[in-house]
Image (tube, rainbow, N blue to C red):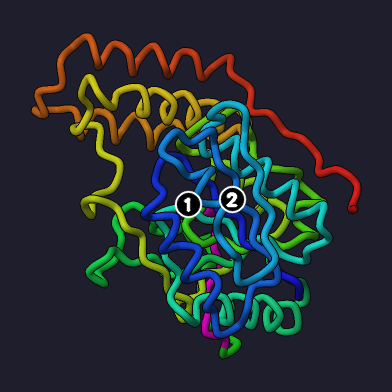
Amino acid sequence: MRVAAVVVTYNRMALLEQTLEALEHQTRPVDHIVIIDNASTDGTDDYLAARTPGVPTTVRRMKENTGGAGGFSTGTELAYGLGMDAIWLMDDDTVPQADALGPLVRDLEDAETRLGAMPSFACSLVLWKDGSLCEMNTPEPTWDWARPLTQGAPYTLMKSCSFVSCLVTREAVHAVGLPSANFFIWYDDAEYTQRLSKFRPGIFVPDSKVNHLLPQNRGVNFGDVNEGNVWKFEYGVRNQIATAIKFRSPTIAASLVENMIKQLRGAGVPKPLVLRLVKAAARGVVFRPEVKRARTVR
């Protein structure tokens, strides 16, 4: 299985260095690295131009910041075009442990034999920088998540996961298309992996571990909304509502509403910011995720 890692970066050169160092020292080597520089202004382009890569590397510098969603869509298409069998998606603050890739590949291949078909993706156990569970990146299991365990497998079935170490198979990309670029940021990974799981469920591989170098170990919480970050929450709300409509899933919308009510209650978020979130939800009713197919293999 030929694997390309796709790393999307924007103005985090110091973190990107750690990610690339970890990728180039995997015990099961990656075959290629695709770096999407989202028009960084911190010298990332000069750093990448001067760097001597340890494995074959493709760098695509975007003309403008297309967000994580645009970067992952472009990176997935580039890796697919290189003829890779699987595409390992991650942000620039993801540091895979040395043996992170091996178990993902091993268990995808095992599942193909054991379950009769290769899963659409495999995701890692995401840890914070102190080794505790990363609150932001817990994958969502399928209703029958334990099925492989009954057959002696070390992995479980997943419905969705984040793009903090998600290995997507070529077959799945061919079947469902690329990540939706027009999401810009937030919930693009949840929408894409749910789309993948409708083709075939993914798997969670606890033997594969990565560290997510967030400033603090905290999941998305609407009680944290302020003037500086509300724009991110607006994208998340819009994108989640759009996904609920696309999949005809009242559960996805209800989960969002429940979290907003619980987390905003007593949090002191100013009413004008709450109103912005409500308007973002309304925009999600008419917003449509973009779905493109990967181009011909090079």
On residue 200, which mark appears?
Answer: none
Q: Is residue 91 above or below residue 21?
A: above
Count neighbours of disc 2 (C-alpha within 10 A) and say few if under 14, some if 14 to 19, many if 20 or more: few
The alpha-carbon separation of the residues under discs 2 and 1 comes to 20 Å
Q: Residue at x 25, y 38 (%)?
A: 221
Which mark is first along the chain, 1 or 2?
A: 2
Element class at badge 1: strand
The answer, for residue 134, to whether it is visible in the render is yes
| Quadrant placement of the N terminus | bottom right
The residue type indicated by label 1 comes to Asp
Magenta-tinted stretch: 153-161
Was residue 156 drawn as part of the magenta stretch in this picture?
A: yes
Q: Which residue is mark 1?
A: 91
Q: Residue at x 66, y 75 (%)?
A: 108
Closer to the camera, 223 or 79? 79
Residue 157 x, y percent position in the rendering: 56, 68
Q: How many marks?
A: 2
Kind of residue indicated by mark 2: Ala
Which residue appears at 57% of the width and 68% of the height? 203
Q: Is residue 200 above or below residue 67?
A: below
Residue identifier under label 2: 49
Callout 1 crowding tier (Cα within 10 Å): few <14, some 14–19, many ≥20: many
- Image quadrant assignment for residue 87: bottom right
Depth order, front residue of 157/234? 234
**Residue 225: percent from left, percent from top:** 23, 27
41 or 49, which lies in front? 49
Viewer-side residue, 68 vs 259: 68
Local SS, label 2: helix
Q: Is residue 244 visible?
A: no
Q: Position of residue 123 (x, y in %)?
A: 53, 65
Residue 131 magenta-highlighted? no
